[in-house]
Amino acid sequence: MKLRFLGQRNHLGGGTHFSNFVDAVKAIYGVGDLVEEVDLVNPAHVDAAAKSGTDADVNVWFWPDKRIHRFKGTHIVWAIFESEKLPASFIESLGRAHGVWVPTLWGRGILVDNGVPAERIEVVPEGVDARLFHPYLRNTQDRTDQPFRFLMIGKFEKRKGYGDLLAAFKHAFGQSRSVELAIKADYFIDGSRRKPELADLVDSHGLSNVKLYWGDWPRERLFGLYNYCDAFVFPSRAEGWGMPLLEAAAAGLPLVATRYSGQTEFLEYLDSSLVPIEYTMERIVDDDFSRFWPAENNDLGRWAQPSIASIAAGMQKLLDQYATYREAARSNSLIVREKFSWDVAANTAVELLCRKNLLKADYTVVG
């Protein structure tokens, strides 16, 4: 049999999920030998894998794909989304699989509300690279005469709340040289357009204390950016998981964040190092979102609308009480790295497959 994972390795959130999870499963002795990766963006690779399949195979799809019917075996689709309302076409695609994985209890509830039978859904978390993202080097840098740095990482799109963040940062700190906002906001689909758009947005607020970072960075350099900053701010409207937020927590950064959607899965362990952002719920009106989640009857569902005043007050509170939040964040770093490592994600998945008698290996005891 094959334990087949169908997705793609890349530096986007989905690619990071795929590569780290698959590597963690491969590291499990006896199970890793069964693993086969399939790059869903490579048609020849898909064709070869489909032709070699058997009824004993387990196929885990990292996104719904119409080619699922070409593969033999048991199919599991990993469903990751940000809205409380899901298109009928998406729900239908999940129905082609034998089971559905979702990374959070919030996501499980959304699927049930959208008509997926509860008995078909299992919660398998995403994770964080606990060996890379940690707080141990934070005190090695000389911070003398350095500004206090807030960090935000995430695609430049409405869902991430950059407009609200910049307005809040200006309200709280203005042009103060003692406080800086670092932003890494790549959007790899049309980055050539997004980069000047974000720069123009920053300029429109007249903020010279906002620094923009771009590029397809290796994970080690990204850790360096977390380590370079003092706190993480994340006014996202909705997340399927919230990987940058978890990485920041693992790296020992205090957080100012919206406590809604997928990230609630790990934020519940971080009360002492989190300043939550107040929000209301609003209808989703966003061209970027509708491009990937086509609206039916012009209804994309709802997501959170963070309060600009609350973002500003949260950043100021964290700055004023930083010593307390910093120590709590260091302690909480260990909690999230233990509970939400990729090893935990891999072991959760393998345990579920074993309980359903879907994993079978033939080992002979020698001697």
Image (cartoon, helix red, strand yellow):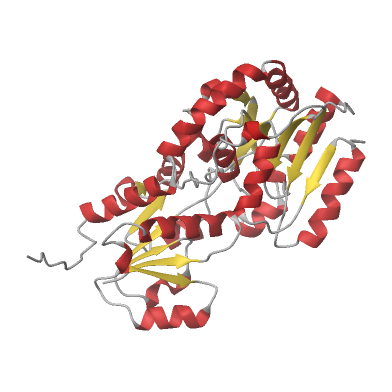
In the visual, does 214 lie left or right of 117?
A: right
Q: Is residue 281 above or below residue 321?
A: below
Q: Nearer the viewer, residue 335 or 282?
A: 335
Image quarter of residue 123? top left
Question: On screen, 301 above or below 7?
Answer: above
Question: For the point 48% across and 61% down, which residue is it?
Answer: 63
Q: Point out residue 55 in the picture as x, y percentages from the top left corner.
A: 25, 74
The location of residue 304, given as percent across then percent down, is 62, 35
Residue 281 visible in rendering: no
Vertical position of residue 166 compared to residue 123: above or below: above
Quarter of the rendering containing residue 68 = bottom left
**Depth check: 133 or 74 in front?**
133
The part of the image, by quadrant, that contains residue 296 is: bottom right
Q: Is residue 33 left or right of residue 66?
A: left
Regarding residue 21, the answer to whether it shows in the image is yes
Residue visible at 7% across and 65% down in the picture: 367
Determine the residue positioned at 82% across, 59% down.
Answer: 193
Residue 196 rendering spot, x and y as whole percentages: 86, 54
Q: Is residue 363 left or right of residue 110?
A: left
**Residue 89 drawn at (x, y percent):** 50, 60
Q: How many marks?
A: 0
The N terminus lies in which quarter of the figure? bottom left
